[in-house]
Image (cartoon, helix red, strand yellow):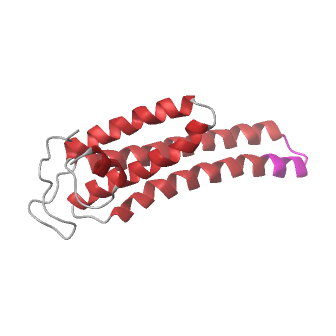
Amino acid sequence: MDWKTLFLSPEGRIGRQAFWIGWLCLLGASIVLNAVPFIGHVLMLLVIYSSICIHTKRLHDMGQTGWWQVLPWVLGPVLVFGAIASVGVSALMTAFHDGEPTAALLASIGGLFMSFFIAFAIWLAFTLWVGCSTGVTGENKYGPVPPNTAAVAL
């Protein structure tokens, strides 16, 4: 498999080694692009698309649909945004009821950090599941076994 197919096509299957090589490349690109103020953040859309492609191909190798990756992409942000909203709502509610907003705010911030932790744990568990599970032996509905599971060609 070549680099273009690995990062830009969700079709087919890849093995664990190709997945981890692609994942590490995307991690490095994310770190570099996040350091560049505006254009880097725009280019992160390409990194997100590439991540979806490699995860989809790896899930196909496991005999699963690529839609499984919706779980960490949706559940993590929902948890975090819900916790952020709860911080603001609890501060407003205590202000309306002449309570002590500091105590409510501190309690809500604890929930926010717990939501960050749970979102990270979901992402980590999903990545390890996709990256460490063995693929289906033989051909499946997503295509034949990857021709060379040990390498990504230049």
Which quadrant is the C terminus positioned in? top left
The image quarter containing residue 106 is top right
Residue at the spot 91% in from the left edge and 46% down from the top edge: 98
| In-image side of 139 versus 58 (left or right) | left
| In-image side of 73 versus 135 (left or right) | right
Task: Report whether residue 129 is seen.
Answer: no
Which is more toward the observer, 33 or 60? 33
Q: Is residue 144 above or below residue 52?
A: below
Q: Residue furthest left?
A: 138
Q: Position of residue 50 (x, y in %)?
A: 40, 49
Q: Position of residue 47 (x, y in %)?
A: 45, 45
| In-image side of 85 versus 100 (left or right) | left
Magenta part of the chain: 91-100
Q: Position of residue 88 (x, y in %)?
A: 76, 48
Queried whether the magenta region covers residue 95, the answer comes back as yes
Residue at the spot 42% in from the left edge and 49% down from the top edge: 122
Q: Main secondary structure of the magenta part?
A: helix
Q: Residue furthest bottom?
A: 141
Residue at the spot 59% in from the left edge and 38% down from the top edge: 39
The image quarter containing residue 18 is top left
Q: Position of residue 11 (x, y in %)?
A: 29, 61
Q: Is residue 106 above or below residue 15?
A: above
Which is more toward the observer, 14 or 119? 14
Queried whether the magenta region covers residue 102, the answer comes back as no
Residue at the spot 31% in from the left edge and 41% down from the top edge: 22
Which is more toward the observer, 92 or 56? 56
| Number of callouts | 0
Which is more toward the observer, 116 or 146? 146
| In-image side of 25 versus 147 (left or right) | right
Task: Report whether residue 138 is seen.
Answer: yes
